[in-house]
Image: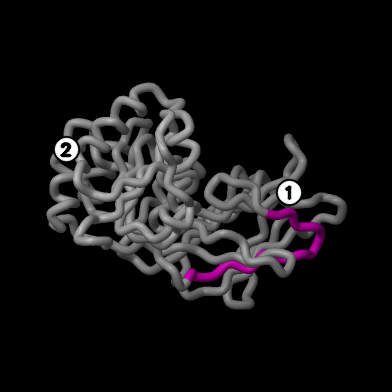
Amino acid sequence: MAGGKLRIGIVARSEIPRVPKMVREVVRALRGEEVLLEPSLARNLRKRPGTVQALRRSDAIITVGGDGTVLFAQRLAPNVPILGINLGGRGFLADVSPNDAQRALRMLRAGKLQLVERERLAAVARGRRLPDALNDVVVCSAQAGKTVALRVSIDGKLAMEVRGDGVIVATPTGSTAYAHAAGGPVIDPRLKVALVVPICPSHPGPSPLIAPVDSRIEVEPTQPGRDALVIVDGNPAAKLRYREKIKIHRSDNPARFFEWSEFYRKSREKL
């Protein structure tokens, strides 16, 4: 805090219909606080931008858009708690409806919103630390339309071999996203686990697995000449050649959110 004011960043995708209007409403509702607009948003709205460094020192970030906007904000300022206003589709991460936005912002300013932590996954590929994943780390074929053969080990023991479109390693938060679409179970985000889900495996394919969150998970391509692509929260992050491993484990830096909607209610309404 600076001079008693909250420093609040705003991250939004201004190309989404209704977003610019909602952002202006948010700015008005935060009058009296130090408000920072993410640089690309500020340019599109012709406003003065905040720097990325300043956003990373914020007390809170408000996102306006969908779950993808929340993931973008997480990459931008991974240690700042987020409150997401949903103008997108499903809205599991951005769970404040436009009708509730003003009340949520008042509660945020008054310090009446509870902070919750969500597990993230850390990953290392080809000696390089990748960005932490809030939802998932996906290993898939680097060649469009081609299957990939993968071996998945958990704590040094073979867990599954997959020939198909790939493998998803997801957090409980990510269990409602791509992992759910691929046939994985929905997991309460309070549980300390990681989820491994094969994507369209050849029949008969392995079943999804749930492992303790402290497990060391390794995935490697096992077919010569068939590389794999690593995607972290929807963003390409690395390539793996034959027998090169990605190592995935629990991140020491959990994500933080201002709690709004109750998980089981969201599950009933959105899945």
Element type where label 2 sits in the image: helix
The stretch drawn in magenta includes residue 241:
yes
Mark 2 closeness class: few <14, some 14–19, many ≥20 residues within 10 Å: some
Residue toward you, 242 or 40: 40
What residue is rendered at 48% in x and 52% in y?
52
Which amino acid type is marked by label 2?
Answer: Gln
Mark 1 closeness class: few <14, some 14–19, many ≥20 residues within 10 Å: many
Residue 152, picture quadrant: bottom right
Image position of 23 with respect to 72: above or below: above
Residue toward you, 99 or 188: 99
Residue 261 picture location, percent across and down: 21, 47
Residue 270, picture quadrant: top left
Residue 111 picture location, percent across and down: 15, 58
Tell me how far mark 1 sits from mark 2, CA to CA: 48 Å
Residue toward you, 43 or 229: 43
Residue with the mark numbered 1: 148
Residue with the mark numbered 2: 102
Toward the top, the furthest residue is 17
What residue is rendered at 22% in x and 43% in y?
30
Looking at the rendering, the stretch of residues picked out in magenta corresponds to 238-251
Element type where label 1 sits in the image: strand
Which of labels 1 and 2 is toward the front? 2
Toward the bottom, the furthest residue is 156
The stretch drawn in magenta includes residue 9:
no
